[in-house]
Image: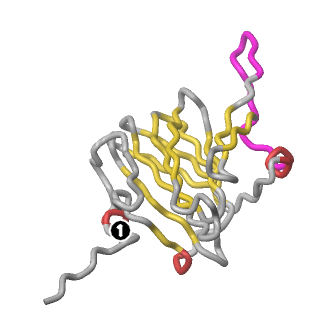
Amino acid sequence: MKFIETKLKGAFIIDLDERVDNRGFFARTFCMKEFIDHGLKPTVAQCNLSFNYKKGTLRGMHYQTPPATETKLVRCTQGAIYDVIIDMRPDSPTYLSHIGVELSAENRRALYVPDLFAHGYQTLTPNAEVVYQVSEFYTPGSEKGLRYNDPALAIEWRLPVSEISPKDATWSLLLEPASVGV
């Protein structure tokens, strides 16, 4: 595996190191030792699969707070997505900064999402399938979210949103507009 650190410390794009021959190729997609060697958390508590019918579907922006913070390793196994992560670590120099990465079945990239990073994605193709390895169990009391179109974040999504859950569409804004008083 090839680990490419992003501008958000601790977040990595992971490319495959393919071993090619006349049959095709073989590549490791996860190795506990290599993750530890790069200072990453190699714990996998859950593996999740998301299938999305429509191009433009948006899922996110989700994260969990202590004591159930979670890391994720996200890979698109069919179609393509635009994956976005936001640094939610209050003491980080990149607090509230975000990056977006295209993950696809074609490029076979993965994105390592550290603890206290909000995560979400938009499908760029119909029938997009996404696999997540997650370090912590889903813990509803620790779940938080950010509005995908929050002006304070200024995320530039690739497409108009075609589908989104009511919960994801209504997370609070970081800076709610002040009420106008008389």
Looking at the image, residue 108 lies above or below residue 37: above
Please name the residue shown 53% across and 31% down the image.
105
| Residue 41, picture quadrant | bottom right
Towards the viewer: 173 or 44: 173
Q: Residues within 10 Å of mark 1 (few under 14, many from 20)?
A: few
Q: Residue furthest top?
A: 22
Looking at the image, which residue sits at the far bottom? 182
Image coordinates of residue 52 in percent, x first then y, are 40, 46
Q: How many marks?
A: 1
Q: Which residues are magenta?
A: 19-32
Asked where in the image residue 167 lies, by quadrant, the reply is bottom left
Q: Nearer the viewer, residue 47 or 149?
A: 149
Q: Residue furthest left?
A: 182
Q: Is residue 102 left or right of residue 108?
A: left
Residue situated in front as seen by the camera: 38 or 141: 38
Residue 26 among those drawn in magenta: yes
Quarter of the figure that contains the C terminus? bottom left
Front-lying residue, 95 or 115: 95
Residue 28 screen position, x and y as percent: 76, 35
User: From the viewer's perspective, is 4 left or right of 75?
Assistant: right
Residue type at mark 1 is: Lys
Query: Is the residue 18 above or below the residue 182 in the image?
Result: above
Q: Secondary structure at mark 1?
A: helix
Q: Quadrant of residue 42?
A: bottom right
Say which residue appears at 39% left-offset and 37% top-offset.
Answer: 124
* Residue receiving disc 1: 167
When the figure is inspected, residue 51 is found, relative to residue 116, above or below; the finding is above
- Percent from the top left, x then y, of residue 106? 54, 27
Q: How is the image coloured?
A: secondary structure
Q: Residue at x 56, y 62 (%)?
A: 95
For image coordinates 64% across by 74% down, the residue present is 68
